[in-house]
Protein backbone atom coordinates (compact mmCIF):
# COMPACT_ATOMS: atom_id res chain seq x y z
CA UNK A 1 0.00 0.00 0.00
CA UNK A 2 1.27 3.43 -0.89
CA UNK A 3 1.95 5.39 2.28
CA UNK A 4 3.35 8.69 1.11
CA UNK A 5 2.53 11.05 -1.71
CA UNK A 6 5.40 11.41 -4.15
CA UNK A 7 6.23 14.10 -6.69
CA UNK A 8 8.76 14.63 -9.46
CA UNK A 9 10.16 18.16 -9.38
CA UNK A 10 11.63 19.56 -12.58
CA UNK A 11 14.88 21.22 -11.52
CA UNK A 12 16.80 23.66 -13.71
CA UNK A 13 19.30 24.64 -11.04
CA UNK A 14 17.71 28.10 -10.76
CA UNK A 15 16.05 29.56 -7.70
CA UNK A 16 12.40 29.12 -8.73
CA UNK A 17 12.53 25.37 -9.32
CA UNK A 18 14.51 24.89 -6.10
CA UNK A 19 11.93 26.88 -4.13
CA UNK A 20 9.02 24.99 -5.70
CA UNK A 21 10.54 21.61 -4.83
CA UNK A 22 11.29 22.71 -1.27
CA UNK A 23 7.81 24.12 -0.67
CA UNK A 24 6.27 20.77 -1.64
CA UNK A 25 8.85 18.74 0.27
CA UNK A 26 8.19 20.85 3.36
CA UNK A 27 4.53 19.76 3.15
CA UNK A 28 5.63 16.16 3.74
CA UNK A 29 5.59 15.01 0.11
CA UNK A 30 8.46 12.79 -1.04
CA UNK A 31 10.10 14.84 -3.79
CA UNK A 32 12.54 13.52 -6.39
CA UNK A 33 14.30 16.13 -8.50
CA UNK A 34 14.59 15.66 -12.26
CA UNK A 35 17.04 17.56 -14.43
CA UNK A 36 16.53 17.25 -18.16
CA UNK A 37 19.93 17.54 -19.80
CA UNK A 38 20.03 19.70 -22.91
CA UNK A 39 22.23 18.66 -25.85
CA UNK A 40 23.67 22.18 -25.62
CA UNK A 41 25.14 21.72 -22.15
CA UNK A 42 24.21 21.02 -18.56
CA UNK A 43 23.77 23.42 -15.70
CA UNK A 44 26.26 22.52 -12.98
CA UNK A 45 24.39 24.17 -10.11
CA UNK A 46 21.49 21.76 -10.21
CA UNK A 47 23.24 19.14 -8.07
CA UNK A 48 24.03 21.83 -5.53
CA UNK A 49 20.38 22.94 -5.51
CA UNK A 50 19.10 19.40 -4.93
CA UNK A 51 21.62 18.86 -2.14
CA UNK A 52 20.63 22.15 -0.53
CA UNK A 53 17.05 20.97 -0.11
CA UNK A 54 17.96 17.36 0.59
CA UNK A 55 16.32 15.56 -2.32
CA UNK A 56 17.45 12.80 -4.66
CA UNK A 57 18.21 14.03 -8.18
CA UNK A 58 17.71 12.17 -11.45
CA UNK A 59 19.13 13.18 -14.84
CA UNK A 60 17.53 12.42 -18.18
CA UNK A 61 18.87 13.38 -21.61
CA UNK A 62 16.61 15.42 -23.87
CA UNK A 63 18.51 13.81 -26.74
CA UNK A 64 18.14 14.00 -30.51
CA UNK A 65 14.35 14.39 -30.35
CA UNK A 66 14.94 17.73 -28.68
CA UNK A 67 17.17 18.89 -31.54
CA UNK A 68 14.35 18.00 -33.96
CA UNK A 69 11.94 20.03 -31.87
CA UNK A 70 14.23 23.06 -31.71
CA UNK A 71 14.75 22.92 -35.46
CA UNK A 72 11.03 22.65 -36.26
CA UNK A 73 8.88 23.84 -33.36
CA UNK A 74 5.13 23.48 -33.77
CA UNK A 75 4.38 26.65 -31.81
CA UNK A 76 7.25 28.79 -33.08
CA UNK A 77 10.11 30.65 -31.42
CA UNK A 78 10.43 33.40 -28.86
CA UNK A 79 12.80 36.30 -29.40
CA UNK A 80 15.67 33.99 -30.41
CA UNK A 81 15.71 30.24 -31.25
CA UNK A 82 13.87 29.42 -28.01
CA UNK A 83 10.82 27.28 -28.79
CA UNK A 84 9.51 27.66 -25.24
CA UNK A 85 6.00 26.27 -25.71
CA UNK A 86 7.15 23.12 -27.51
CA UNK A 87 10.02 22.84 -25.05
CA UNK A 88 7.70 22.85 -22.02
CA UNK A 89 5.38 20.29 -23.60
CA UNK A 90 8.42 18.11 -24.36
CA UNK A 91 9.72 18.46 -20.81
CA UNK A 92 6.35 17.52 -19.34
CA UNK A 93 6.25 14.45 -21.60
CA UNK A 94 9.68 13.32 -20.38
CA UNK A 95 8.82 14.15 -16.77
CA UNK A 96 5.65 12.10 -17.03
CA UNK A 97 7.64 9.07 -18.20
CA UNK A 98 9.86 9.44 -15.14
CA UNK A 99 6.80 10.04 -12.92
CA UNK A 100 5.36 6.70 -14.02
CA UNK A 101 8.69 4.90 -13.61
CA UNK A 102 9.05 6.34 -10.12
CA UNK A 103 5.37 5.68 -9.28
CA UNK A 104 4.98 9.34 -8.36
CA UNK A 105 1.65 11.13 -8.17
CA UNK A 106 2.32 14.53 -9.68
CA UNK A 107 4.89 16.89 -11.17
CA UNK A 108 6.20 20.11 -9.63
CA UNK A 109 7.63 23.03 -11.59
CA UNK A 110 9.06 26.39 -10.59
CA UNK A 111 7.05 28.30 -13.20
CA UNK A 112 5.79 31.73 -12.13
CA UNK A 113 2.86 33.32 -13.92
CA UNK A 114 4.07 36.23 -16.07
CA UNK A 115 7.76 35.68 -15.30
CA UNK A 116 8.83 34.82 -18.84
CA UNK A 117 7.48 36.35 -22.01
CA UNK A 118 6.75 33.22 -24.02
CA UNK A 119 6.09 30.19 -21.84
CA UNK A 120 4.81 31.70 -18.61
CA UNK A 121 1.91 33.83 -19.75
CA UNK A 122 -1.52 32.51 -18.74
CA UNK A 123 -2.64 31.67 -22.28
CA UNK A 124 0.63 29.85 -23.10
CA UNK A 125 0.57 27.90 -19.84
CA UNK A 126 -2.99 26.80 -20.65
CA UNK A 127 -1.89 25.88 -24.19
CA UNK A 128 1.03 23.86 -22.82
CA UNK A 129 -1.25 22.07 -20.34
CA UNK A 130 -3.79 21.25 -23.07
CA UNK A 131 -1.07 19.70 -25.25
CA UNK A 132 0.68 17.75 -22.50
CA UNK A 133 -0.10 14.29 -21.12
CA UNK A 134 0.00 15.77 -17.64
CA UNK A 135 -3.22 17.83 -17.47
CA UNK A 136 -4.23 18.41 -13.86
CA UNK A 137 -1.10 16.93 -12.29
CA UNK A 138 1.30 19.82 -12.89
CA UNK A 139 1.61 21.78 -9.67
CA UNK A 140 3.20 25.23 -9.80
CA UNK A 141 3.60 25.96 -6.09
CA UNK A 142 4.88 29.54 -6.51
CA UNK A 143 1.83 30.62 -8.53
CA UNK A 144 -0.70 27.93 -7.54
CA UNK A 145 -3.21 30.41 -6.13
CA UNK A 146 -3.29 32.27 -9.47
CA UNK A 147 -4.82 29.16 -11.09
CA UNK A 148 -7.76 26.86 -10.39
CA UNK A 149 -6.87 24.00 -8.01
CA UNK A 150 -4.98 21.09 -9.54
CA UNK A 151 -5.50 17.40 -8.71
CA UNK A 152 -2.80 17.39 -5.98
CA UNK A 153 -4.61 20.29 -4.29
CA UNK A 154 -8.10 18.84 -4.74
CA UNK A 155 -7.03 15.47 -3.36
CA UNK A 156 -5.35 17.11 -0.38
CA UNK A 157 -1.87 15.79 -1.27
CA UNK A 158 -0.71 19.37 -0.74
CA UNK A 159 -2.31 22.20 1.19
CA UNK A 160 -3.28 24.92 -1.27
CA UNK A 161 -3.40 27.51 1.54
CA UNK A 162 0.34 27.04 2.02
CA UNK A 163 1.14 27.55 -1.65
CA UNK A 164 1.76 30.97 -3.21
CA UNK A 165 0.29 33.61 -5.49
CA UNK A 166 3.45 35.03 -7.01
CA UNK A 167 3.15 36.59 -10.47
CA UNK A 168 5.00 39.03 -12.70
CA UNK A 169 8.60 39.56 -13.72
CA UNK A 170 9.92 40.83 -10.36
CA UNK A 171 12.24 38.60 -8.34
CA UNK A 172 11.71 40.04 -4.87
CA UNK A 173 8.97 37.59 -3.73
CA UNK A 174 11.16 34.61 -4.63
CA UNK A 175 14.17 36.13 -2.86
CA UNK A 176 12.09 36.81 0.25
CA UNK A 177 10.73 33.26 0.15
CA UNK A 178 14.29 31.93 -0.19
CA UNK A 179 15.23 33.85 2.92
CA UNK A 180 12.20 32.58 4.84
CA UNK A 181 13.01 28.99 3.84
CA UNK A 182 16.70 29.40 4.71
CA UNK A 183 17.95 28.94 1.14
CA UNK A 184 21.29 30.63 0.58
CA UNK A 185 23.89 30.66 -2.21
CA UNK A 186 21.35 30.08 -4.97
CA UNK A 187 22.43 30.77 -8.54
CA UNK A 188 21.58 33.93 -10.46
CA UNK A 189 17.82 34.25 -10.93
CA UNK A 190 16.28 33.42 -14.29
CA UNK A 191 18.34 32.91 -17.45
CA UNK A 192 20.42 29.82 -17.99
CA UNK A 193 18.97 28.80 -21.35
CA UNK A 194 21.37 29.25 -24.26
CA UNK A 195 18.47 29.22 -26.72
CA UNK A 196 17.38 32.63 -25.43
CA UNK A 197 20.77 34.15 -26.31
CA UNK A 198 21.21 35.93 -29.63
CA UNK A 199 24.83 34.86 -30.22
CA UNK A 200 24.13 31.21 -29.46
CA UNK A 201 20.99 31.26 -31.61
CA UNK A 202 22.95 32.49 -34.61
CA UNK A 203 25.44 29.61 -34.21
CA UNK A 204 22.55 27.20 -33.87
CA UNK A 205 20.84 28.54 -36.98
CA UNK A 206 24.09 28.08 -38.90
CA UNK A 207 24.31 24.51 -37.55
CA UNK A 208 20.78 23.74 -38.78
CA UNK A 209 21.42 25.43 -42.14
CA UNK A 210 24.70 23.56 -42.84
CA UNK A 211 24.38 19.96 -41.61
CA UNK A 212 27.57 17.88 -41.84
CA UNK A 213 26.75 14.92 -39.58
CA UNK A 214 26.57 11.31 -40.81
CA UNK A 215 24.56 10.00 -37.85
CA UNK A 216 22.80 11.06 -34.63
CA UNK A 217 25.95 10.69 -32.51
CA UNK A 218 27.79 13.19 -34.71
CA UNK A 219 24.78 15.50 -34.71
CA UNK A 220 24.50 15.47 -30.91
CA UNK A 221 28.25 15.87 -30.45
CA UNK A 222 28.34 18.82 -32.85
CA UNK A 223 25.42 20.42 -31.03
CA UNK A 224 27.30 20.02 -27.76
CA UNK A 225 30.24 21.87 -29.32
CA UNK A 226 28.10 24.90 -30.15
CA UNK A 227 28.68 26.45 -26.74
CA UNK A 228 32.46 26.03 -27.00
CA UNK A 229 35.03 28.27 -28.64
CA UNK A 230 34.98 30.87 -31.40
CA UNK A 231 33.06 29.84 -34.52
CA UNK A 232 33.93 30.83 -38.07
CA UNK A 233 32.33 29.89 -41.37
CA UNK A 234 35.15 30.02 -43.89
CA UNK A 235 32.86 29.17 -46.79
CA UNK A 236 29.39 27.62 -47.19
CA UNK A 237 30.76 24.10 -46.77
CA UNK A 238 33.33 24.70 -44.06
CA UNK A 239 33.03 25.74 -40.41
CA UNK A 240 35.79 25.85 -37.83
CA UNK A 241 35.68 26.08 -34.03
CA UNK A 242 38.72 27.49 -32.21
CA UNK A 243 39.12 26.94 -28.44
CA UNK A 244 39.22 30.07 -26.30
CA UNK A 245 41.12 28.65 -23.33
CA UNK A 246 42.67 25.47 -21.98
CA UNK A 247 39.36 24.17 -20.67
CA UNK A 248 37.68 24.56 -24.07
CA UNK A 249 40.70 23.07 -25.86
CA UNK A 250 40.42 19.99 -23.69
CA UNK A 251 36.65 19.76 -24.16
CA UNK A 252 36.96 20.08 -27.95
CA UNK A 253 39.70 17.43 -28.06
CA UNK A 254 37.55 15.08 -25.99
CA UNK A 255 34.42 15.57 -28.10
CA UNK A 256 36.16 15.61 -31.49
CA UNK A 257 36.43 11.80 -32.11
CA UNK A 258 32.63 11.44 -32.05
CA UNK A 259 31.93 14.64 -33.99
CA UNK A 260 32.84 13.67 -37.56
CA UNK A 261 35.14 16.71 -37.72
CA UNK A 262 38.85 17.18 -38.36
CA UNK A 263 41.13 18.09 -35.45
CA UNK A 264 43.96 20.59 -35.81
CA UNK A 265 46.41 21.66 -33.13
CA UNK A 266 49.68 23.60 -32.83
CA UNK A 267 52.69 21.27 -33.12
CA UNK A 268 55.68 23.43 -32.15
CA UNK A 269 54.07 26.39 -30.34
CA UNK A 270 51.39 27.15 -27.72
CA UNK A 271 47.99 27.93 -29.12
CA UNK A 272 44.38 26.83 -29.37
CA UNK A 273 43.04 23.67 -30.95
CA UNK A 274 40.55 23.71 -33.82
CA UNK A 275 37.85 21.37 -35.09
CA UNK A 276 36.60 21.82 -38.63
CA UNK A 277 33.41 20.51 -40.19
CA UNK A 278 32.62 20.15 -43.87
CA UNK A 279 34.74 20.01 -47.01
CA UNK A 280 38.26 21.37 -46.69
CA UNK A 281 41.05 21.53 -49.26
CA UNK A 282 44.75 21.78 -48.31
CA UNK A 283 44.45 25.55 -48.80
CA UNK A 284 41.50 25.59 -46.37
CA UNK A 285 43.48 23.64 -43.76
CA UNK A 286 46.35 26.11 -44.16
CA UNK A 287 43.89 28.93 -43.56
CA UNK A 288 42.70 27.21 -40.36
CA UNK A 289 46.37 26.83 -39.38
CA UNK A 290 46.78 30.59 -39.85
CA UNK A 291 43.78 31.18 -37.56
CA UNK A 292 45.39 28.95 -34.92
CA UNK A 293 48.61 30.92 -35.39
CA UNK A 294 46.69 34.19 -34.93
CA UNK A 295 45.51 33.05 -31.49
CA UNK A 296 48.78 31.28 -30.65
CA UNK A 297 51.47 32.58 -28.32
CA UNK A 298 54.72 32.28 -30.34
CA UNK A 299 54.24 35.16 -32.76
CA UNK A 300 58.02 35.42 -33.27
CA UNK A 301 58.36 31.82 -34.48
CA UNK A 302 59.00 31.97 -38.24
CA UNK A 303 57.61 28.57 -39.21
CA UNK A 304 54.72 27.37 -37.14
CA UNK A 305 53.80 23.74 -37.54
CA UNK A 306 50.23 22.48 -37.34
CA UNK A 307 49.20 18.90 -36.72
CA UNK A 308 46.08 17.65 -38.46
CA UNK A 309 44.11 14.57 -37.36
CA UNK A 310 41.40 13.19 -39.56
CA UNK A 311 40.08 9.81 -38.42
CA UNK A 312 43.21 7.77 -37.71
CA UNK A 313 45.43 9.81 -40.08
CA UNK A 314 47.97 12.33 -38.78
CA UNK A 315 49.84 14.88 -40.90
CA UNK A 316 51.80 18.07 -40.27
CA UNK A 317 52.12 21.25 -42.30
CA UNK A 318 53.74 24.65 -41.92
CA UNK A 319 52.13 28.04 -41.49
CA UNK A 320 54.12 31.18 -42.16
CA UNK A 321 51.84 33.98 -41.04
CA UNK A 322 48.60 34.42 -39.12
CA UNK A 323 45.36 35.67 -40.66
CA UNK A 324 44.39 39.29 -40.12
CA UNK A 325 41.73 40.37 -37.62
CA UNK A 326 39.75 41.93 -40.49
CA UNK A 327 39.54 38.50 -42.14
CA UNK A 328 38.42 36.88 -38.89
CA UNK A 329 35.65 39.42 -38.43
CA UNK A 330 34.43 38.74 -41.97
CA UNK A 331 33.96 35.03 -41.28
CA UNK A 332 32.96 35.04 -37.59
CA UNK A 333 29.61 33.50 -36.64
S1 LIG B 1 13.81 29.22 -21.89
FE1 LIG B 1 14.84 27.47 -22.89
S2 LIG B 1 14.59 25.76 -21.46
FE2 LIG B 1 13.10 27.32 -20.87
S3 LIG B 1 11.23 26.79 -21.97
FE3 LIG B 1 12.33 28.25 -23.27
S4 LIG B 1 13.56 26.99 -24.66
FE4 LIG B 1 12.91 25.67 -22.94
Image (cartoon, rainbow, N blue to C red):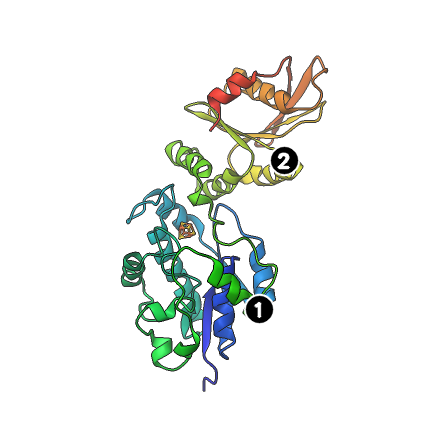
Q: Residue at x 46, y 36 (%)?
A: 199
Task: Say above or below: 95 vs 223.
Answer: below
Task: Say above or below: 159 vs 313.
Answer: below
Does label 1 or label 2 sit earlier along the sequence?
A: 1
Label for residue 249? 2
- Location of residue 6 in the rendering, given as x and y in whole percent from the top left corner: 46, 76
Disc 1/disc 2 C-alpha distance (Å):
35 Å
- Location of residue 130 in the rendering, given as x and y in whole percent from the top left corner: 27, 62
Around disc 2, counting alpha carbons within 10 Å, would you say few (fewer than 14), some (14 to 19), or many (20 or more)?
many
Q: Nearer the viewer, residue 289 or 47?
A: 47
Residue at far bottom of view: 1
Q: Can residue 102 be spotted in the picture?
A: no
Task: Say above or below: 176 vs 30.
Answer: above
Task: Say above or below: 330 vs 83.
Answer: above
Q: Residue at x 48, y 60 (%)?
A: 172
Q: Looking at the image, how many numbered discs can be counted on the residues?
A: 2
Quadrant position of residue 147: bottom left
Quadrant position of residue 103: bottom left
Q: Nearer the viewer, residue 126 or 176?
A: 176
Classify mark 2: helix, strand or loop. Answer: helix
- Ligand 1 is within 8 Å of the C-beta of the residue at disc 2: no
Kindly identify which residue carries mark 1. Answer: 53
On screen, residue 279 versus residue 85, left or right, reads right
Q: Residue at x 40, y 78 (%)?
A: 161
Q: Quadrant of the N terminus?
A: bottom left
Q: Nearer the viewer, residue 185 or 108?
A: 185
Amino acid sequence: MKVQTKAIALMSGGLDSTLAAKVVRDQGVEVVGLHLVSPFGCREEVKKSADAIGIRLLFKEKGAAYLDLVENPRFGYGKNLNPCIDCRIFMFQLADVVRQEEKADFIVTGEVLGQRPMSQQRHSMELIDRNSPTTGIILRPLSAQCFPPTIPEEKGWVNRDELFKISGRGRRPQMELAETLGLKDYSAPGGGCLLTETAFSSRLKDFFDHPTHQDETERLTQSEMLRLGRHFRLHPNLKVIIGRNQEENMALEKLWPKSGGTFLSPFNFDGPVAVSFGEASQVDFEQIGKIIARYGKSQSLAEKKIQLKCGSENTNFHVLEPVTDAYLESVRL
